[in-house]
Amino acid sequence: MADLINTSELYPKIDPEILDSCIHCGLCLPACPTYLTDYNENHSPRGRIHLIKAWSQKRIEYSDSLSQSINTCLMCLGCQTACPSGVNYEAIIESAKVSLINYQNPFLRKLTGFVFKYILPNYLVLKFSYYLLKLWQFINGKKIFDLILYFLGKFKLENSKFYGFFNKLNELQLFLPDLSNYEPFNLEIHDCNPCTKPSAKMSDNVLICSRPQKLDKQYVFFTGCVMEVFYHNVNQSVVNVLAKNNIGVANNKQTCCGALALHNGQIDIARKLAAKNIAYLGSNPLGVIVTGSGCTAMLKHYENLFTPDDGEIYSKARAFSRNIQDSAQVLAKFDNLKLNLTNKIRVGYHAACHLAHAQNIHDEPVEFFKKLENNNKAYLQFIPIEEAEYCCGSAGIYNLMNTQTSLLVLERKMKFIKEAGLNYIVTSNPGCLLQLQTGCELFKVDVKVMHIYELLDTLIN
């Protein structure tokens, strides 16, 4: 990944062996959600590789169509799982993104860079944004935008930039999280170490962590930035379920994992955030457990952000990446869970792309739910859904930047969820949670969307 480091290059610098490993067989096509939306070869993995290869070899120059081909990629890596040749598509698309950012609108580049560098790593700012979003939802901001668009239409301004701006903002409101009722400035309640003090109470509808008297295992808890502030209830559920299985967590200083920065080509910011997390967490003897699979994949990816030329940080990054565990990996440690249910429920599982494809964790969650079903046959039925490992269309901020394509991908996903006749659909990533909740509302699918641990927290004794 050394060729990713130079962000001033106007052409991607990619190892020719990686590019030549693609034999253009087309077996990746059925695994590519964007290709399945329009069957455009330029929006397929092999089509993108062909274009990126020509660009890296300076046989073609940058163009809007090249940019569109690369930017419509969800980076879900479903193609990488499907590829019989083992093509490292992740390295190819990340390298292209790093070069592509040099052609991005300067204002947009600075704006996203500011968010990645100063907003996401700043928990105080994120907590204030929680209140702003809560206020916007309280005053029903969507109706305000609907009213503005209505009056602009009355004055026949549908084709104006002003109308387009407010219409885009109105679209983006589809992906606003429905915020839980808790106090974001009082989030320090993750504590399931043996203790006699009562746990803090987050809200009336979230269980209080029941601390074990003796721990069988303990982890450092990586809470994430967006995950911690906007999905704090899910983080608390992870702590609760671990506690009920005699596993504790320890808090440690940390910052944003840098995934969004990397996936949008801003590798310099991603490297700086990685270096901070390695400094904060790297010397801790405990393993690091992570709630959101996107964060986990990025933390495991740190070793690829540095090279031997970077000195000590390279060896530290390699050791750090090998010390990371997704919360989904820990499910195998839970034996003979008994559910607190009176009626039978039907549960399906959507595999987050950064769990299944980026981390290559396919079987563990499925096997866990099969075992849970077997131990609780009267109360739970696990229903496999079609294309469970296909992207839902969230992909970080993809749904904000490529809304229409995102919704087409989501519509296909919701079709299969609806056909399965579920009561619950569970997943392991905050982006997927938000996207699937949006899908249920948009496409009238009566299914409750929850993180795996959030569901377990409500069901197990």
Image (cartoon, rainbow, N blue to C red):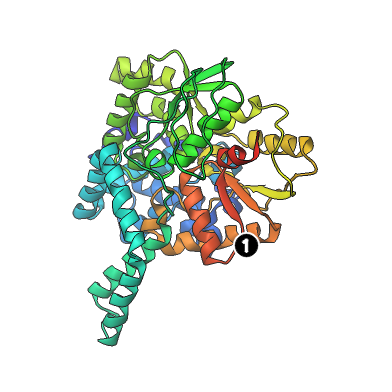
Q: In which quarter of the image is the C terminus?
A: top right
Q: In which quarter of the image is residue 216?
A: top right
Q: Can residue 388 be spotted in the picture? A: yes
Q: Position of residue 368 (x, y in %)?
A: 68, 34
* Figure disc tally: 1
Position of residue 76 relative to residue 135, above or below, is: above
Q: In which quarter of the image is residue 125?
A: top left
Q: Is mark 1 on a helix, strand or loop?
A: helix
Front position in the image: 204 or 341: 204
Write the residue at 48% across / 23% down. 249
Position of residue 305 relative to residue 134, above or below, is: above
Write the residue at 52% across / 63% down. 441
Q: Where is residue 124 in the image (x, y as percent from the top left)?
A: 26, 39
Q: Can residue 19 be spotted in the picture? A: no
Q: Position of residue 134 (x, y in %)?
A: 34, 54
Q: Position of residue 422 (x, y in %)?
A: 68, 55
- Does residue 164 appear left or right of residue 69 in this picture? left
Query: Residue under circle 1?
Result: 415
Front position in the image: 413 or 170: 170
Q: Quadrant of the N terminus?
A: top left
- Does residue 301 appear left or right of residue 110 in this picture? right
